[in-house]
Amino acid sequence: MSHTSYNKQWLMAQQEISDLLVEECPPEPPKPEQDKTVAFQNVATLYVKYIQIFRRLEQCYDQVVHPQKRMLLRHLLDGVTGRVLELKNELVGLDFHEVHVLDDILMDMKLTPADLEMPIPKYYTLERAKVLKEREKMLSSILARIGAGEAKESDEYKMSIPDAIQLVQVHERARQGRLRAKFMREIRQQEEKENEAAARGVPTLDPEVAAIKVQKVWKGFAARKRVRKEREEEMMFIHMVPAPAPPYKNTAKYASLKNEDKRRTTQETNEQEYQNARISVKQKIREVEGPDMKETLQESIREWFIETRDATGKFPDFPEEDEGGSLKIFQEKDPAELAKELEEKEEGGDKKKGKKGKKSGKKDKKDKKGKKGKKGKKGKGDDDEEESGFKMAESKFLPNVKEASSDFDTVWKTRDESLNFSQKHDLELIKEEKRKEVEEEIRVQVDELMRQELKNLKMAVDKDKGKKGKKKSGKKKGKKGKKGKKSGKKKGKKEKDLTPDRSIESLYEELVEQGIIVRPPKVLIKDFLGEFNYSGAVLRQRNVEPQVSAHDVRRAITEYCILPMGSQRVHEMAAHVKSVLIMGPEGVGKRLLVNAICTETGANLFDLSAETIAGKYPGKSGLTMLIHMVMKVGKALQPSVIFINDAENTFLKKVPKKDELDPKRLKKDLPKTLKGWKPEDRLLLVGTTNKPQDSDHKGLCGLYQKIILVARPDYGSRQILFRVLIDKYGGTITNALNISDLARISDGFTGGLIEAAIKSVLTDRRLSQMSKKPITASEFLNPLSVRSQVFESDEKEFAEFFSKKTPLGKKRAKAMKGDDEDDGGKGGKGKKGKKSGKKGKKGKKK
């Protein structure tokens, strides 16, 4: 695509944003929605629309090469990302599900399930490519050093060179002997056949007859081969059979990816030129326009001195830098008004403040009594219709979206760029930006000079008053400074650094050597294969809970883990998700999802599973040191993922006596550690479990904020698994292989079991025979029959735990029964009203 195409795509996204801003920010606040179904449909529609905008903006930001446009696009992309996450939280609060059925909305908007896929912004890793490469080098060097040490220990078991040569010679002589024996056997068999034929007196064929027979056989073989080829071409023509893929370098996809890489390199060069231009333009403005700016500002401040002296009879006080300095002066219109305000502050300011304090105290008491009375009345049952119902929470990201949208309208919407073919930076915009910066720097310098000049004028005219005022102000400032020091000391005591003398690199190296920092395999979220559940809406209408599809799991992991962790601004402002539990049977891809989170965000992976930390850092002090090191390194090299495999072990009901792993070692320290995490800390605790029933559900569900259930793959997902994995491991899918039958037969098997079966079938020997003997579905029967599948009873256990033990499941069960008082409905407000009403009665009696 060209520059014009991406600009048009951005314009379309901006038009959609403008329409949504009109809908979301009406002139009058909307009334709360009484019907939860209607509220869910409204929020879900906004959610789907913002996802479409997000998809366009992500592509634009990745491919637009203009540096100044990219700055605005980044600001807008972060705002839209945050808004998507906010709407997701609203949907969860209305639907009490981590995944949602949006089939009706997709049909109304004429979209496909693929349009709901959340692409991962590529700048999460591309903009940190150098940092990630350095970290990978450091990790590789540490692991290589550890591996070299292990190899030295095993040197004594290595074979000597003469022994190795002798062993090779023995095997080579045996191979040659076997070949020689095979040839001799074939010669002997041939001689025996000829002798038998001569003994029977079999006549030899005439050469012409023999030639005709050979021709018949060959022509028949050639005709059958030609017909088979024509049949395959016909089936490809009518799209009944997929056409063979051309060489990858000749495909349009390869050309498109190469073009995208070229645009990214152009982005880097344009960005470097833009940064250099900012420095040079600022220096030039400072040299050329700086002196004139300074003189003009000094003259205007002197005029203000004289006008104020003429109007009030004395020189004014120059505003401090904290108050804005000379900016505050030029905001005032009349010097006489400024003099009156200064006199009121000096003479009667303290008295008025005291009176206001007393009055406000009385008003506060009255307001409290009035509020109590009002609450009491509401508690009796007179609920306000305007306050009940659903109303969306105030957004933190909409102001950012508004600001970016207005900047686009004022700067880029009508800007003529017909001559900017290479999409370089705009010098006029840089000048406007840097002129303001230079003016601010000069203003600070001029303020210091004029403050000294005003001081000299006051000294000459009114020396005594100036001295008294300075002494008082000096004392007050000194006291404030002392308080600030005390408060700083108190804050410092709370956070202790147990390793003050050690660098981050040394701590990182130690954690790698202990096996706590792990190198995750490079896996993308799209590698979690699976299809959309097309029967979800129908099942919900029948009050049947639909199976969670792989499409839903991908979207949930993206929204809760990847999008917040990838952007610092989004993580600080969005709802803070500190911990996620991925639950499901063995082999459904839980660990793959953890690796995908680390790959997509470029995060470190800290493994604090019971098996990993068993016997390491013993005792209470050792555990404290371990957690401190993990937190220190994780915060310094964020984003970081802290992984706990078999998360149920942390909260086991009964620990076996022979268990030496001490699985409940982190039970007390993990919740305390999570409380100390702040929004600016891009840390995420991810646990995986396939036996949540064995744990104390209160502790497990209390530690993990979000719980995502991963079910076994359905029919459509199994079809995708077989197609992709057979191709991945070197097999070719032909008409002889019925994928549909395989998907039906493998019902109940997880993705891990299917992959293991495919690996066992597609050996090197079988792949070598693929051209002569195509693979069939029957070959997968034995490998699948050996493996144990996941039964419906096992899935019901997970569904029951999810619905009865998790907080969200309990809320959903209450909502299904109609008892949603604790979930923000009318009943909840009524109960609160009754309590407040009782308080109001007590207040009246008193």
Image (tube, rainbow, N blue to C red):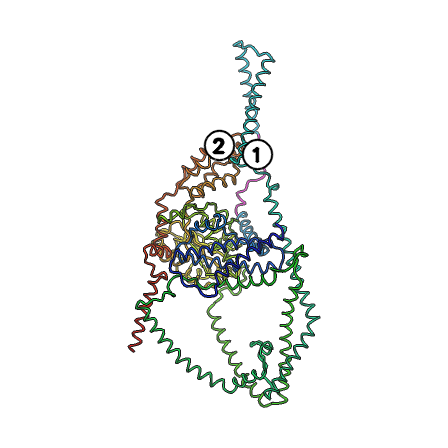
Q: Secondary structure at mark 2?
A: loop
Task: Give the image location of residue 488, x and y in percent.
Answer: 50, 73
Viewed as shown, does residue 215 lie left or right of 576? right
Disc 2 designates what residue?
736
Contact, CB < 8 Å: mark 1 with mark 2? no
Instruction: Determine whether 781 is above or below 826 in the image.
Output: above
Q: Secondary structure at mark 1?
A: helix
Viewed as shown, does residue 743 lie left or right of 568? left
Q: Is residue 751 visible?
A: yes
Seen from the viewer's position, the closer of residues 304 and 846 is 304
Q: Which residues are magenta?
A: 153-172
Task: Give the image location of residue 45, x and y in percent.
Answer: 46, 55
Dot 2 amino acid type? Ala
Q: Is residue 662 visible?
A: no
Q: Residue at x 57, y 31 (%)?
A: 172
Numbered tag placed on residue 364 in the rendering:
none
The first of marks 1 and 2 along the sequence is 1
Residue 400 belongs to magenta span:
no
Disc 1 designates what residue?
168
Which residue is the extreme one toward the left? Answer: 845
Dot 1 amino acid type? Val
